[in-house]
Amino acid sequence: MPRRHLLLPLTCLVTALGVADPAAADETAESSVGVTLEGGGLSISAPSEVENLGTASSLVGPVTISGQLGQVQVIDTRSAPEGSGWAATAISTAFTQTAGPSIGAGSIGYSVGPIDRSGTATYTANDPVDLTGVSPVVTATAITGNNTATWNPTIHVAVSANMPAGVYRGTITHSVL
């Protein structure tokens, strides 16, 4: 008789501890979840005005006047697919004064110099010696994700012999695509 009293409490204990049907333990619930990262844009900035790139005091013979333009920066937050790229370009107008001859855009050169960069890309500097037409100045290829490039180009203005004294002004336009 004492054995029956032990068996009943033991059976109740096993049931209370959760020994249940093994098929119930195989139940799961899954949720497919995602997030969206929206890409930004592609932009370029450059100084709006540079007072004077340099001065030459004697114009008997041809001379080249060179000076730094100031910081040019491309910001690419498009989260572009791997392998995509961009090209920054420059073009110049003729440098003119109020009256008289001008210095043509074919006499305007562009040297990129060092490129400060962030992100994953291959950056290439191109140093056009003539800004008559749209010329690539920096290209980025093999891009993965967002990136930036910043440089301070040196502008070279080739002045022919016997040009009249004066202040010559032109416009250098940067674009990125």
Image (cartoon, rainbow, N blue to C red):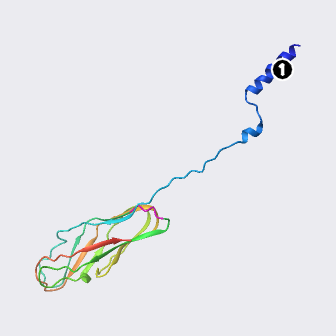
Residue 140 appears in view: no
Q: Residue at x 47, y 69 (%)?
A: 84
The percent position of residue 160, horizontal first and vertical second, equals 18, 85
Is residue 56 shown above or below 144?
below
Is residue 44 shown above or below 164?
above
Front-most of residues 116 and 139: 139
Residue 45: which quarter of the image? bottom left
Front-most of residues 62 and 13: 13
Q: Quick one: label 1, few (<14), some, or many (20+) residues within 10 Å?
A: few
Is residue 19 shown above or below 117?
above
Q: Is residue 77 magenta?
A: yes
Residue 112: which quarter of the image? bottom left
Q: Residue at x 15, y 74 (%)?
A: 55
The percent position of residue 167, horizontal first and vertical second, equals 13, 76
Secondary structure mostly seen in the magenta stretch = loop
Residue 70: which quarter of the image? bottom left
Q: Residue at x 12, y 84 (%)?
A: 100
The percent position of residue 49, horizontal first and vertical second, equals 21, 68
Q: Is residue 47 magenta?
A: no
Instruction: Return the residue found at the far top.
Output: 1
The percent position of residue 13, horizontal first and vertical second, equals 76, 23
Task: Left or right? Give the position of 8 relative to 44.
Answer: right
Circle 1 is placed at which residue position? 7
Task: Left or right? Give the position of 138 relative to 164.
Answer: right
Q: Quadrant of the N terminus?
A: top right
Amino acid of disc 1: Leu
Q: Secondary structure at mark 1?
A: helix
Residues drawn in magenta: 76-80
